[in-house]
Amino acid sequence: LPRVGLILGAFVWAQGGVRIGECGMYSCNLFVVAVGYTPGYVWGLSTEGVFVVEGEGMRYRELSRVSGLHENVPTDLYTTAQGLVFLGYKEGMVQYGRTPEDLQSWGDIAASQFYTARRIWDFAAWGDSLAMATDFGVVVWHIRRREALSTIVQLPGRPFASPVRKVL
């Protein structure tokens, strides 16, 4: 919680750099739902979209479809110890990278014809594996090889292809 307060404090400070008489854009990211860090970037996901605070100068900017996001408001944001950020979307698309400029897309979940609901709800990483909670189960992805290792759609005591909201 103190880390979130520090980040939100930096956000407020970054917004205050416009002098009287100058035109400035003041964005509203009041409902921050996820925060992460990769070297040189603090990433935030709010109900309004994705924002980053960059470098030692703490330059604030918002990301959108114009700057390369798949959609303006992802469903989840997660950062790993390897310095990668992952963004999940409601139709199953996943974007990942080290900086806002190098985000790549992985669309295997989005392209699946087996499930109509494919939302990415949560991420969790251990070693080179990344688990993704989805509307139909859990997908395990190999981070270095950039490929799916398995899809788990039958969990004990739950109906086939049940939504999973959280992975630990």
Image: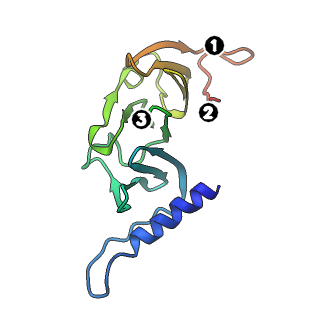
Amino acid marked by disc 2: Arg
CA distance separating discs 3 and 1: 29 Å
The residues bearing labels 3 and 2 have C-alpha atoms spaced at a distance of 22 Å
Please state the horizontal and vertical placement of residue 115, each as a whole percent of the image.
48, 20
Which of the 4 image quarters holds residue 85? top left
* Label 2 CA crowd tier, 10 Å (few <14, some 14–19, many 20+): some
Q: Residue at x 32, y 78 (%)?
A: 18
The image position of residue 125, as x and y in percent, is 54, 27
**N-terminal of the two: label 1 or label 2?**
1
Query: Which SS class for mark 3?
Result: loop
x%, y% of residue 159?
A: 67, 17
Q: Amino acid at mark 3?
A: Leu
**x 37%, y 71%: residue:** 26
The N terminus appears in which quarter of the rendering? bottom right
Q: Which residue is mark 1?
A: 154
Is 24 in front, or is 55? 55
Q: Secondary structure at mark 1?
A: loop
Residue assigned mark 3: 84
Task: Work out which quarter of the rendered image holds the C terminus and state it.
Answer: top right
For the residue carrying disc 1, how many other residues have a C-alpha within 10 Å: few (<14), some (14-19), or many (20+)?
A: some
Say which residue label 2 marks: 165
Q: Residue furthest front?
A: 56
